[in-house]
Amino acid sequence: MKHLLGIEDLTKEDIESLIGSAMELKAARSLDGDKPLFGQTWAMIFTKSSTRTRVSFEVGLNELGARPLFLNANDIQIGRGEPIKDTARVLGRMVHGIIIRTFDQEDVEQLANYSGLPTINALTDEEHPCQILADLLTIKERLGGWERKKVVFFGDGDCNMARSWAWASKRLGFELVIAAPEEFQLDADFRDRLGDSPVTITDDAEAAAAGADVLYTDTWISMGKEEEAADRLRVLAPFQINSDIVAKANPGAIVQHCLPAYRGKEITEEILESHADAIFQEAENRLHAQNAVLVALAGA
Ligand code: CP
Ligand code: NVA
């Protein structure tokens, strides 16, 4: 594994090995642990806001012996139009790895290709692979694994999280149901690319919840979609995770949210707070899952 650009690019073995390594790193976490990235500098280019991703990468890089170099895209020349491929070639001669959060998946691919450095997608409009790895780690810890489990994603069924979940389901073979209104379901091109998979799509949220082991949601208004807010809030309202939906799931089902959460929109205050332990475990797991990715890429 040279990069982490999307779950689409990973094999079942890649994912299983990353989750196994994340569990080991989590158990062994200590400030004076191994420093497999000793002396390295990793650039972190962010074009969009972040709390969890930025903090977990900065802490993780420090703990693994590397220095994070946070670059707000507006402060570097990318913000004034310097091409990604030129930025990539400069970074390739100075730093040891790149973490990028931006809009276009193509920009992440260009950065990886022109820099020659290990590159990590920290969220694009297409995928959020780091989040999925943390989610899978949480499912492993809470439910013992994803085999024979039913995961249901509610809400904007064509957003980066839904797409990454679809690839995870295809690669690992667990059942994924995406409950979304027709205009927010995986688009035709994506479905063609996905091909045969254990993913089903429905606009019936209650039927989707029946027998679920994991109930998952994400904001209805992803970064960059703010102008569509009013329409999204109206159309997505029936896809909220609330007590009626949770009551339909299997006993012991977990509720997951990649965060940030908007209470009263995609999830109720009551459900978020009553499942906060699992949801913030999921947030913590960003650190451990990403450390596993950093160690894998540094050793490649
Ligand atoms: N879940 C997630 O990526 O959170 P941030 O946007 O805060 O990084
Ligand atoms: N779909 C959301 C995820 C946030 C972590 C977004 O892209 O804004």
Image: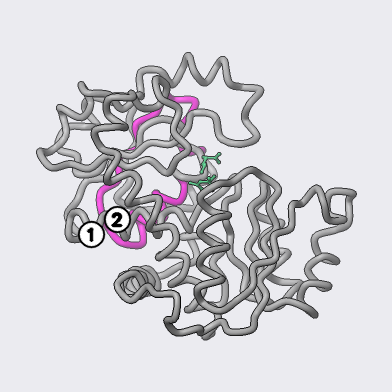
Q: Is residue 58 left or right of residue 240?
A: right
Q: Do callouts 1 and 2 mark residues in contact (Cβ within 8 Å)?
A: yes
Q: Position of residue 15 (x, y in %)?
A: 37, 68
What residue is drawn where x is 33% and y is 76%? 28
Of residues 44 and 113, the one drawn nearer to the viewer in this rendering:
44
Residue located beneath label 1 in the image: 141
Image position of 75 with respect to 59: above or below: above
Of residues 73 and 26, the one drawn nearer to the viewer in this rendering:
26
Q: Amino acid at mark 1?
A: Glu
Residue located beneath label 2 in the image: 138
Of residues 209 and 80, the one drawn nearer to the viewer in this rendering:
80
Q: Is residue 246 left or right of residue 287?
A: left
Q: Position of residue 284 (x, y in %)?
A: 39, 55
Q: Position of residue 199 (x, y in %)?
A: 33, 46
Q: Position of residue 236 (x, y in %)?
A: 43, 21
- Dot 2: element: helix
Q: Is residue 66 left or right of residue 47?
A: left
- Is residue 123 inside the magenta stretch? no
Tell me where residue 244 sits by quadrant: top left
Tell me where residue 162 sits by quadrant: top left
Q: CA distance from mark 1 to mark 2?
A: 5 Å
Q: Is residue 154 left or right of residue 56?
A: left
Please state the extent of the stretch shown in magenta in the rendering. 162-187
Q: Amino acid at mark 2?
A: Thr
What residue is drawn where x is 64% and y is 67%? 68
